[in-house]
Image (cartoon, rainbow, N blue to C red):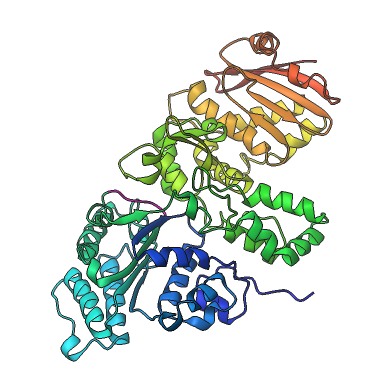
Amino acid sequence: MDRRILPVGKQNFEEIRQNDMIYVDKTQYVWELAETSLAYFLSRPRRFGKSLFTSTLECYFRGKKDLFKGLYIYDKENARGENAWTEYPVITFYLSSGEFNDPSGLQDMLNNVLENVIREYDLTGEYAISGETLSVRFRNVIMNLKEKTDRNVVILVDEYDKPLLSTMLTDPEQEEKNRLLYKSFFSALKDMDGYLRFVFFTGITKFTKISIFSDLNQLNDISLDNDHSGICGITQDELEANFKPEINALAEEEDMTYDECLSELQKMYDGYHFSKDGVGVYNPFSLLNAFFKRDFGTYWFGSGTPEILIRKLKTSHMPLYSLIDGVTARESTLQDYRAEDNDPIPLYYQTGYLTICGYDRRFRRYTLRFPNDEVKYGFLDSLVPSVLGYRTEENPVSLDNMILDLESGNLDSFFKRLTALFATIPYPEGRAPEYEGEWSRQLFLILELMGEYTQAEVHMATGRADCVVKTPDYIYVFEFKLDKPVEDALAQIDDKGYAIPYSADSRKLYKVGVAFSSEKRNVTDWKIAE
């Protein structure tokens, strides 16, 4: 079978359609949004299709009819008769790339867009643009476009927050300058409803102090709306309707059945929810790469976890296990982002590292968790340098042999490796880690990372065993104690009945007590009971 063309990394709607690449039809959302003539803001994680959707809007408003043949919007638009496929003047700001750490980087980018529009629409003579500031020039471009074309103007701004996120840690002073430039530039849109046909902003985060959200109070945030939950990403129905040949090819490569392949795709790349009751979606970037390479890789993490997320987690002192068990947040917390707030939850949600998995209607609170294995293990692995120290020959942070020890029932070897690993972890000079601090983070991370290769359920909370590991032949129920006898750990397993749920299993069951010493900063004893 000849391979079909997958739009891996492609964000240009016209290029995808002209080159007969696979396109998942999202034009129903284009139609519904365009019909209202309102101003919108959409937040979605990186590499989730925001730029492609913006490009689709641009082609639609430019009246490029032929690109939409066979799609949902084609017949809907044709039904307008002589008013179909009206071409509007469009100003599009694609801000996903640029030298925004440069003092004039953002200003040059905005000015370049305006200059291109002036040339494209030949705004000369009586329509010539004047204005000493960017904001005034922007306003005059919009007004003169309306006057020359006799049509209201479409404004599209993709990845508006990139100039802020890219400078937040590296150059806070430049970030503030970029923020102030935004405030003056986009304030030009205020009170211009009579000149505007449609306004659409996308971004990862919603910065509450940016003028588009304070001055432009007409901007409608659809990020958490049920009706728009599938606007970016790929739903289960879209996956099976559009990619059956690719699923079959991947299944054949991995020696799986079709259904087994679907199950693994769900486990790896599905699970994103952007509203309380809306449809779930797959990460499109990872999904397309898995089909292209025919391998269940971790593609979304190719560029690594942003440093700002690691810093947020460290300064918040949030236990790592809470990210597994689930954290809660109010709607206002998820929608807004304040750089000075130590709470990492809004940023983790907006950047795609946590997703909605539940909603309490009484208290209007969301429950958030990792969406899938790609995100979970990619995120945890990115924490290794800050929690366990950097990988070296002495500290490879390689869990392969530890997992093999558990699979073979060799607990003595397992604990020797665990002790050796803890001995290499650096600590702040003169300060031993507390169990609820460094100890819990380190131990949790080691055990959770093992869960990528074997069944490990790590809880680190009272009322449940600290960790349960299941292998093909064994089940281990672990309990850990700090500066207490190892017998206390075993007694707690029995007193609380932690092992009872597994007693009927055919596999060999071990109860394992483990003692840590804050003075020695390591495992000091372990005891096994059947």
The x and y percentages for residue 243 are 69, 64
User: Is residue 203 rendered magenta in the image?
Assistant: no
Residue at x-position 73% and y-position 17% = 499
Residue at x-position 21% and y-position 89% = 124
Check the picture and name the quadrant holding the C terminus: top right
Residue 318: name its quadrant. top left
Above or below for 129 versus 467: below
Above or below for 32 versus 346: below
Residue at x-position 71% and y-position 59% = 295
The x and y percentages for residue 49 are 51, 62
The x and y percentages for residue 335 are 38, 46
Horizontal side of residue 234 vs 477, given as left or right: left
Above or below for 354 versus 521: below
Residue 463: name its quadrant. top right
Question: Would you say residue 410 is visible in this rendering?
Answer: no
Q: Farthest residue toward the left?
A: 132
Looking at the picture, tell me which residue is in the foreground, 488 or 78.
Answer: 78
What is the magenta range?
A: 204-208
The mark total stands at 0
